[in-house]
Amino acid sequence: MIPRYSRPEMVAIWSAETRFRIWFEIEAHAAAAMAEIGVIPKDAAATIWEKGSKAKFDVDKIDAIERVTKHDVIAFLTHLAEFIGDDSRFVHQGMTSSDVLDTCLNIQLVRAADILRTDIENVMAALKKRAFEHKTTITIGRSHGIHGEPTTFGIKLALAYAEFDRCLKRLDHAREEVSTCAISGAMGTFANIDPRVEEYVASKLGLTPEPVSTQVIPRDRHAMFFATLGVIASCIERVATELRHLQRTEVLEAEEFFAPGQKGSSAMPHKRNPVLTENLTGLARMVRSAVVPALENVALWHERDISHSSVERMIGPDATITLDFALNRLAGVIDKLVVYPQNMRKNLDRLGGLHNSQRVLIALTQAGVSREDSYVYVQRNAMKTWEHGKNFLTELKADRDVTAKLSADQLEAMFDDAYHLKHVDTIFRRVFGAA
């Protein structure tokens, strides 16, 4: 992933140094387990741990060896042997390369999930804070981009909070699903390695033994993981798209914080563009681009082929690093978001009270008018407002079919916007709890 959209902690998970250190730990734990059950000498296992833990793996040297061997794990084991000496013959006994590669990948994905979990919690904290700040800030709700009925800006933010709360649960499930370990040998049959070794390694690394593997851990687990990242990315984009619309000049109900000295356009000095949320939309696309390849990785030939390998070397780092950056950026956007309640009020009033049309419709039906006729009475007055800028309440009061059933006082009562906010507390309790 390019540095522009990368944060150091997540990048470190995918570095060659981290990968080789995890490979060593897998091999060393396996050796310790084999020593415990009497397969290799205990002093050999101790030497592997002692010398390997102090080793400073030379990435360039391992790469040079791989250019000859054309095999990354063999290149690493060859380099490791330089540190361990004669006892290196007890390393990797009965194991296959995928035992190391797959277990390492899952460890990296688990570590990445832990960072992403914190990221989501930070987004939720920002959303909760701003939601309560604007709990009763009235604004017009829109469907198809057209004014509907009032809601509050706090409800919009509460919706996003609930969305990311679901994302958190999905991520926890995906993390659990990918937290498996396979140390089961060439075809996953444990022919040359005791299953107890796998159980030992899994326990030491905080993983669960894979119930049944082939030469690889089944890739449906990874498909689920990357699909979850794709859903989280889509939730980021939904919020970003909402904010981009709200920042449009003719709407301007909210906008990204514009820092002192910031420039919006090289040509037009007046511009204040929603560059961060547009960036989030693009980053979401990149995270989702990992989903289809991950799904296609599920169907491998027989017990294994390596068609998945090149894919995972790319999507593992790219998807997690990008999503980490995007979540962090979203938290900052929400925290510093500039909100304009006065513009929300102005936009709400633009259609002359049309947002109360349903209340009038219902009232007419309750007064004995058929739904079909009630709709006709309300719509014909609403269209005068749409097309000629008339005041909706005034037109209703002048309509004899309407006033035959509803008095002026009754009609005026239907234009109290507080009516639309009476269940805001209920929604907030459902989202945030009684507190």
Image (cartoon, rainbow, N blue to C red):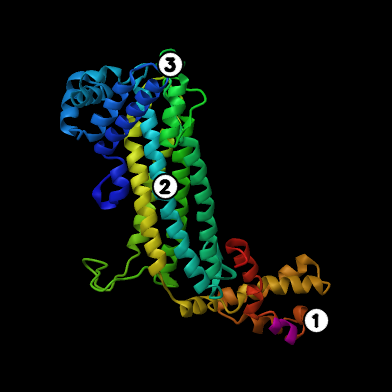
- Residue at x-position 21% and y-position 33%: 55
Q: Which of 251 and 376 lies nearest the eye of the viewer?
A: 251
- Tell me if 350 is positioned left or right of 422 in this view: left
Would you identify the image quadrant in which residue 418 lies?
bottom right
- Residue at x-position 21% and y-position 22%: 78
Q: Please tell me whether mark 2 sits on a helix, a strand or a loop.
A: helix
**Does the magenta portion include 410?**
yes
Q: Name above or below for residue 266 compared with residue 194.
A: below
- Residue at x-position 36% and y-position 28%: 29
First in sequence: mark 3 or mark 2? Answer: 2
Q: Please tell me whether mark 3 sits on a helix, a strand or a loop.
A: loop
- What residue is disc 2 on? 114
Q: Position of residue 60 (x, y in %)?
A: 16, 32
Q: Please tell me whether mark 1 sits on a helix, a strand or a loop.
A: loop
First in sequence: mark 1 or mark 3? Answer: 3
Would you identify the image quadrant in which residue 274 lies?
bottom left
**Amino acid at pointer 2:** Asp
Pair 1/3: label in front = 3
Q: Which of 39 and 416 lies nearest the eye of the viewer?
A: 39
- What residue is disc 1 on? 404
Which residues lie in the magenta part? 409-413
**Amino acid at pointer 3:** Met
